[in-house]
Amino acid sequence: MFQSFDSVSDPAQAGPRLEKLRARMAEAGLDALLVPRSDEHQGEYVPASAERLAWLTGFTGSAGSALILRDRAVLFVDGRYTLQAREQTDPALFEIESLVDNPPRKWMKANLSKGARVGFDPWLHTIGEIRRLRAALEKTGAEVVPLEQNLIDAVWDDRPAPPAGPVRIHPLAYAGETAADKLSRLSRKIEEECIDHTVLTDPASLAWAFNIRGSDVPHTPLALGFAVLSASAGPRLFLDPEKLSDETRAYLNELAQLHTPSDLDGVLAELAKDGGRIGLDDGQAAERLRLVVEEAGGTVVSLSDPAALPRATKNATELEGARAAHLRDGVALARFLAWIDAQTPESLDEIAVVRHLEACRREVGGEFQMPLRDISFDTISGAGPDGAVIHYRVTEKSNRRLAPGELLLVDSGAQFDDGTTDVTRTMALGRPSAEMQHRFTLVLKGMIAISMLRFPPGTRGADIDAFARLALWKAGLDYGHGTGHGVGSYLSVHEGPQRIAKTGTEKLRTGMILSNEPGYYREGHYGIRIENLIAVTAPEPIPGGEIDMHGFETLTLVPIDRRLIDPALLTAEERDWLNAYHQRAFDEIAPLSDDATRTWLRAATAPV
């Protein structure tokens, strides 16, 4: 079983831990301390040894930050986690603020006094983040202080050891391009930017560039490490040697000079001396790297991670892998949904749902001789009011039994060698109310709108986000998360820089894979989300048009609950899309399914 149901959140521990931390702050002469939810790589998923925010506060969401002062503490979270933060933290100890509307720098600008000293670990904050923080606090006279030692680590007595998962070679049959060719492309890019070296700090970029996969963080096949790429010299790769087998070490030795991560400071300082120009990604690279370069006499040049866009624009092999992975996943989800419908709701709880879904994926992976490597994130299985918690994670403590008349929201994904999946379906447990059907159909209209969209080259995710919300907006409704995130190729289920959101500034390019997942959440009652993965298609002419237009190919093949659809709210075009989608799902999944699932599929995909 890949998913654990233990509750790692313990608000009762926050008081004593805060007391110890504040004692350390006093010793360091600090008035405030920033505690982010990040590690040295600034990724969404971090190893247990880097879960400092959860250890201190009890909050276990994937995004957030705490500001600890001598007499108060503030936890900043975004709209996905507002309810979760309230439930997981002690309100007597932590105030909850919006990470978006009132982030730490804005809060500190309004609340800190002149001369206040704010400590931070420069490994855990990006260059751009600290630059913005300094600019905000200059006007108040407060000081930002980089620390040599992380103060959480100093008081975390039973902190887990850093991860040392084995590194595997990702075969060319799934990668579609050799690591040598990728590294040559990146070297040319660095030369074009007129810099000497750059540091890859995102482990996903290491995984893509070197065609390797690891197991250092939950559910995402990453090997934590760094790489230095150069315009006129070979790459340097910084990985824990304990993670490398003889075969993997020999493979990587052909591509790069191998170092341990602890060597990075010294190597970077040597490259930076005498005015070396070092490219660092402001939004990804740790402030610590900037300090090392500039203290050695080098020049930091702002440079976006050169691997990010090539990684995001999937090649033909990766797209074929994604289609194959989604076909298998469709078979597993159909088997799972047929099983759900055959049960009485009272006989199941949220954990049983998660366990059976993972079992279906394992079974189907074995049948196709493509093993399930992992789930792509902790499955969200929210029944009734739990479905309204956008990133709900069921634990033994929170586990809820299903009940007739409720909705069940299941958001899940799989990691296969040839692709990463992510799909959400909301199911009726018995007869849904008219309100549920109305809200569900509005969400469905938004999902269909994105699916059918045609758009010109240069369009950004922010330009199309409103299409998914239009039906909800007309009804005075909305949802508090983005419409779509990027997805990797047997990599992170949340991949940048592409996204469909109000903040999605990256242009959508051919080969990018994104989620399409509008939703609606009625706090205390139910949640609705419908999610498919989609791939950006190459621009093609439209009859009678003047501009070739991109479109989306839908990858996910999983029926949408017809019992929750109010056909009267659909246009003829929307109905045609839905019926064609369901027919395609049946045609591709049914031949690969058992008799019972095939019978269920026939009814589940009948025309609306």
Image (spheres, grey):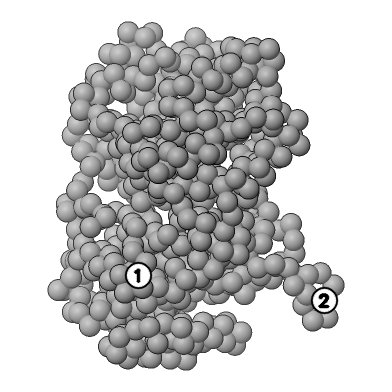
Q: Amino acid at mark 2?
A: Gly
Identify the element where label 1 is drawn.
Answer: loop
Q: Identify the image quadrant of residue 408.
A: bottom left
Q: Amino acid at mark 1?
A: Gln
The residue to which callout 2 is attached is: 545
Residue 369: numbered disc:
1
Q: CA distance from mark 1 to mark 2?
A: 45 Å
Question: In x, y percent, where is residue 429?
Answer: 27, 77
**In this rendering, is residue 249 above or below 389?**
above
**In this rendering, is residue 339 above or below 87?**
below
Q: Identify the image quadrant of residue 275.
A: top right
Identify the element where label 2 is drawn.
Answer: loop
Please name whichever residue, 230 or 257, is drawn nearer the observer in this view of the structure: 257
Q: Identify which residue is drawn at 18% across, 79% down.
A: 344
Task: Report whether residue 202 is seen.
Answer: no
**In this rendering, is residue 214 above or below 460?**
above
